[in-house]
Amino acid sequence: MGRAPHQRAVPRFRLRSRLLTVVVGAAALAVVAAGCGGNGSSSSSSNTGGTRVKGGTAVYALPPSTTPNYIFPFTSSAYISVTNLAYLSQLMFRPLYWFGQGETADWNASLSLANQPVFNGNKVTITLKHYMWSNGQTVTASNVMFWLNMEAAVPEDYGGYTGFPNSVVKDIKVVSPTELTMTMDKAYSHSWFLYNELSQITPMPEAWDRTASGPSHCTTTISDCKAVYTYLDGQSKTLNSYASSPLWSIVDGPWKLKSFNADGHISFVPNTTYSGPIKPTLSQFQEVPFTTDAAEYSVLQAPNSSISVGYLPEQDAPAKPANAAVGTNPLHGYSLSPLYPWSINYYVMNFQSTTGNGPIIRQLYFRQALAYLMNQKAVIDGPLRGYGLFTTGPVPTFPKSQFLSPSIPTGDPFPFSESKAKSLLTSHGWKVVPNGTTTCTDPSKCGPGVKQGQAMNFQLPFATGTSWITSEMTQLQSNAAAVGIKLNLKPEPFNQVTALAAGNCVVIKSSCAWDLADWGGGWVFAPDYQPTGEELFLCGVPANSGGYCSKENDSLTNTTLTTSDMQAMYNWQHYLQPQLPVQYQPNAVYSLTEIKDNLRGVTPQPVTLAINPENWYFVK
């Protein structure tokens, strides 16, 4: 996706690929950064009762063709993903602030390494709790400074690039082993600074401050950090040395690596020195790989299956009754629990298209007409088999949060209507030809740049491999044809679609010769847990794939970063939602998780897509 540009109207940019690398084949009804869902993570049968058993090995089925391949938590932009964070590094190396509490993405005070930050104007004070590294050293403010110095030195290499701390912090001081202060260039929203900036930090042990030639001083000297990063990044690419490495054996999380195979067979054992509030009960946690969801389901169905936590493939999912979380579980010995991430889902339109269709896409009436042709309800009830929710705008509707305006309706903001789509086009100078090609007959009404006789004819590549997306696109094509909009579907491999359309083509200097594209999903808000929109919809930011640009939106967005008044969030949503910077499509369940009946603690599943096997235990 390239390097983020220099700062413009906002305090930082974030260039992340988590929206892309969440794709995991089809973990149940998984989609790329697949969206939120209906009735939470409640299971079809309650896993309660029984006597806790100390020990035991829990086996976790990794999503198809998805294996961790990067251990360093300061993750390179080429490797940042749910796979590497949730399934590997965060089990061992804990972020300074942990997010995800029950079925919410809220800050979790009990699992954080630091107390709630204290704000005083443009100054914030961070006080660490007592946590230990597994080598006997204490987690200190200097370990936090180590991370901050590295992020300041090599922001272009870090996969979560935001420009933080360089762009918002004027001064950072280690006051004591447990206290650190930051002075910002101005006062910011307390929730935004915690949820989207401090959320990035993972303290790093003193032993990592080194290069191949010996100890270094990145903790205190920023100019030393690039060489340290280069060394640690290189060590992260030597996969077969992970379990034996003296670097990666130093952890502050609940788990230590016992064995690691690049094919995805990974074993963890408890970190006996873990300082957190919940110590592992299991004696071992294992991850096992699968090349396809069918292969995983075959093992899951076997008598006395070794899988403790697995998933149902899409084609085997039971239809969900309207008022239930899941349908009838086809497997005996397991309970079924849907997992819905903290996310939104959409397909993109290229406002900067050089195909000749850019002027059409920039017309709000056209975007509204397209929205009326996306039948979200039919997709949810049909190919999603009930496991999905409407996407209503730029902020997730599930789980409920303080960030969503109470005035935003939970239903489809553009309920399917061919008649409304047709009316919008005819009233703006288009001759609608059902099942033909609609053309502009009055350029003065069609909009600036639209030519006399110009046809509504668009290319729409979409990612293959997820059957509900294929069904959705076919349905959209048929709906659009009814009002003379020709959508030329092009099923392509996921990587080809994202290479074409996942980054702002002007910012990253790639081809703008595309109109519409669907890589199968939208954006998971992690580790940017407050959905303020500055990463996705501001003018000129890299992840603004379609290049939507509005000065009004920029102003409203910037206000959300500098005030703690939640009304600013609501004002921004009320403006942007009907503007359709992207085309909303249903949020699909990320995984229909199968949990062994004698295993407890797996639910509620974190909407941040983290896994917490330290909470798990077997019963008899």
Image (cartoon, rainbow, N blue to C red):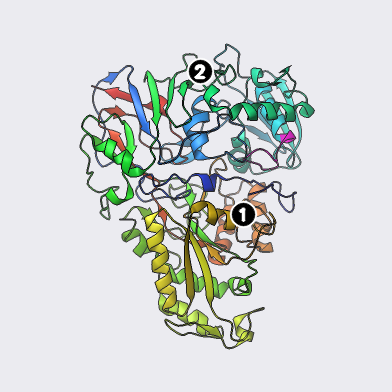
Residue that label 2 marks: 275
Query: Which residue is nearer to you in this view: 421 or 212?
Result: 212
Residue type of the residue flagged with mark 2 = Ser
Query: Which residue is nearer to you in this view: 384 or 600?
Result: 384
Q: Quadrant of residue 605?
A: top left
Q: Residue at x 41, y 24 (%)?
A: 614
Does residue 485 appear to the left or right of 613 in the view shown?
Answer: right
Does residue 533 appear to the left or right of 368 in the view shown?
Answer: right
Instruction: Look at the picture and state if 370 lies above or below 72.
Output: below
Residue that label 1 marks: 503
Q: Position of residue 584 (x, y in %)?
A: 48, 61
Q: Quadrant of residue 483?
A: bottom left
Q: Position of residue 512 (x, y in %)?
A: 64, 63
Q: Quadrant of residue 537?
A: bottom right
Q: Find numbered disc 1 in the image and state the secondary structure of the residue it sits on.
A: loop
Q: Find numbered disc 2 in the image and state the secondary structure of the residue it sits on.
A: loop
Q: Residue at x 53, y 29 (%)?
A: 89
Stretch of the chain drawn in magenta: 152-163
Q: Residue at x 65, y 48 (%)?
A: 561
